[in-house]
Image (cartoon, rainbow, N blue to C red):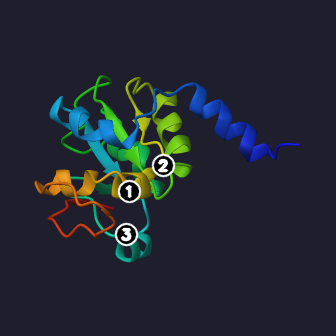
Amino acid sequence: MSSRIDVVLRSARRRLRRLPAAQVPDALRRGAVLVDIRPQAQRFREGEVPGALIIERNVLEWRCDPTSDARLPEAVGDDVHWVILCSEGYTSSLAAAALLDIGLHRATDVIGGYHALAGAGVLDELRGEPPAPAALANAGGAVRRWL
C-alpha cells in the first residue's frame, strides 16, 4: 500500500515534463531558469550549482509569481520555464507542481535532483569545464540568493 505522500508525489509528477539531468544545460541555453530550493545546510554539504537561483522552498511561489509584489526580476510572465532542483528530485516535483497550480505552466523539475546533475557531469559543464569521469565535485561558482 502506498503512503498518502507517495500518491501526492505520483500525481504531481504526472503533471510535469520532468528533465533528465543531461538535458538541463540545453534547457538553460534555451532560456530556462534553474532554481535550487535546497536548504542552506544541504547546499553547504552537497555543493552549489553554478548559475542557479537560490530560492528557499518556503518562498518559491511568491518569488516566481509574476503578479506577486515579492517576485524576482526573472518572473516576467506565465511562460517562464522554471526548472526546480532539490537534492534527489522529490521535493522539487512537489514544488514544480505548486508552480503549475498558480499558472506557471512551464514549471518542471530535474529527475534525480542535484545528485543526478553531479553524477552526469552537468555541474562541470555549468562551470564551463569538461565533464569529469566521476563528477561528484562541489560547485563553487557565484550564485544569486533569493531567500
What residue is rendered at 22% in x and 34% in y?
Answer: 26
Above or below — where is 138 with respect to 78? below
Indicate the secondary structure of the residue bearing disc 2.
loop
Q: How many marks?
A: 3
Viewer-nearest residue: 34 or 66: 34
Q: Position of residue 89 (x, y in %)?
A: 51, 49
Residue at numbered disc 2: 112
Quadrant where the C terminus sits is bottom left
Q: Secondary structure at mark 1?
A: helix
Quickly name the residue at label 3: 43
User: Residue 128: percent from the left, percent from the top?
Assistant: 10, 54
Determine the residue located farthest toward the front in the rendered image: 133
Secondary structure, mark 3, is: helix
Give the labeled residue for mark 1. Answer: 119
Q: Amino acid at mark 3?
A: Arg
Looking at numbered disc 2 in the image, what kind of residue is underneath it? Gly
Q: Is residue 63 left or right of residue 99?
A: left
Q: Residues within 10 Å of mark 3 (few under 14, many from 20)?
A: some
The image shows residue 68 at horizontal and vertical percentages of 34, 39
Which numbered disc flags the more N-terminal residue, 3 or 1? 3
How far is disc 3 from disc 1 in space, using C-alphas? Answer: 16 Å
Task: Name which residue lies at 16% across and 34% down.
Answer: 29
